[in-house]
Image (spheres, rainbow, N blue to C red):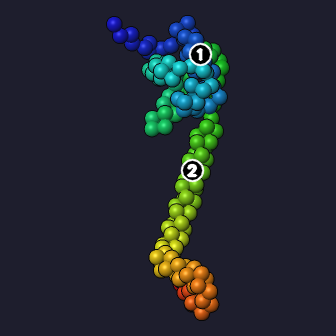
């Protein structure tokens, strides 16, 4: 048997979870995750109760993509009480975080391009390791044989290889 949410919620219809959600939304617009954090309710409980509160027009899903919710009318409020002001502070905070993330992403793209240029430059300036090994071997032989001319030639070749 599936229970349908009531079209109109009265204070007597509210669960403890509903009251916690309504209290959290009195502070302004919140995402589902923020409601979970502020109420310490399980995310499935928050989802289910938000569905009921939305069906009863107590809560509005402002932006379904980001799951942003705002309080429309608190069933606990007296008729004389003004409707709570929905705040754009959470939306502004989310927008600020999004802008920061976009800036960081752009910085990372620029850094990636710089590193790719450096890698390309390093690859074009690569050293012929085999040639360097041969020159080192010649230098070691010249030193062993005490042949100063061959040692100087081998050292000059190594310098040229490293300077290339």
**Residue shown at 49%/37% (left/top)?**
66
User: Which residue position is annotated with label 2?
Assistant: 101
Q: Position of residue 157 (x, y in %)?
A: 55, 87
Query: Where on the picture, by quarter, is residue 148?
Result: bottom right
Q: Residue at left 58%, top 11%?
A: 16
Farthest residue toward the bottom?
A: 149
Crowd tier of the residue under label 2, counting other residues whose Cα lies within 10 Å: few below 14, some 14–19, many 20 or above: few
Identify whether 14 is placed above or below 145.
above
Q: Which of the marked residues, 2 or 1, is nearer the chain's N terminus?
A: 1
Q: Which residue is located at x 60 percent, y 21 percent?
A: 40
**75 over 99 or under it: above or below:** above
Label 2 and label 1: CA atoms lie apart by 34 Å
SS of the residue under disc 2 = helix
Rendering coords of residue 123 (x, y %): 48, 73
Residue ranking furthest to the left: 1
Q: State the residue in front, 73 or 164.
A: 164
Q: Nearer the viewer, residue 12 or 159?
A: 159
Residue matched to label 1: 19
Disc 1 secondary structure class: helix
Evaluate whether residue 159 shows in this view. Answer: no
In the image, 100 versus 146, the foreground residue is 146
In terms of depth relative to the viewer, which is nearer, 111 or 60?
111
| Residue 78 image offset from top left, x and y in percent | 63, 15
Residue 128 spot, x, y in % from top left: 47, 78
Q: In this orientation, does residue 41 appear?
A: yes
């Amino acid at each position: 048997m599936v229970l349908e949410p009531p079209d109109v919620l009265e204070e007597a219809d509210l669960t403890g979870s509903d009251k916690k959600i309504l209290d959290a939304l009195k502070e302004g617009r919140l995402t589902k995750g923020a409601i979970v954090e502020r109420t310490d309710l399980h995310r499935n409980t928050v989802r289910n109760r938000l569905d009921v509160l939305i069906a009863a027009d107590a809560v509005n899903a402002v932006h379904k993509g980001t799951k942003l919710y705002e309080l429309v009318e608190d069933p606990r409020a007296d008729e004389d009480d003004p409707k709570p002001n929905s705040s754009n502070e959470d939306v502004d905070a989310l927008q600020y975080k999004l802008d920061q993330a976009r800036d960081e992403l752009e910085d990372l793209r620029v850094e990636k391009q710089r590193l790719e240029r450096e890698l390309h430059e390093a690859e074009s300036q690569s050293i012929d390791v085999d040639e360097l090994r041969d020159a080192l071997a010649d230098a070691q032989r010249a030193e062993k044989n005490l042949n100063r001319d061959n040692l100087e030639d081998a050292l000059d070749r190594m310098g040229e290889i490293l300077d290339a």
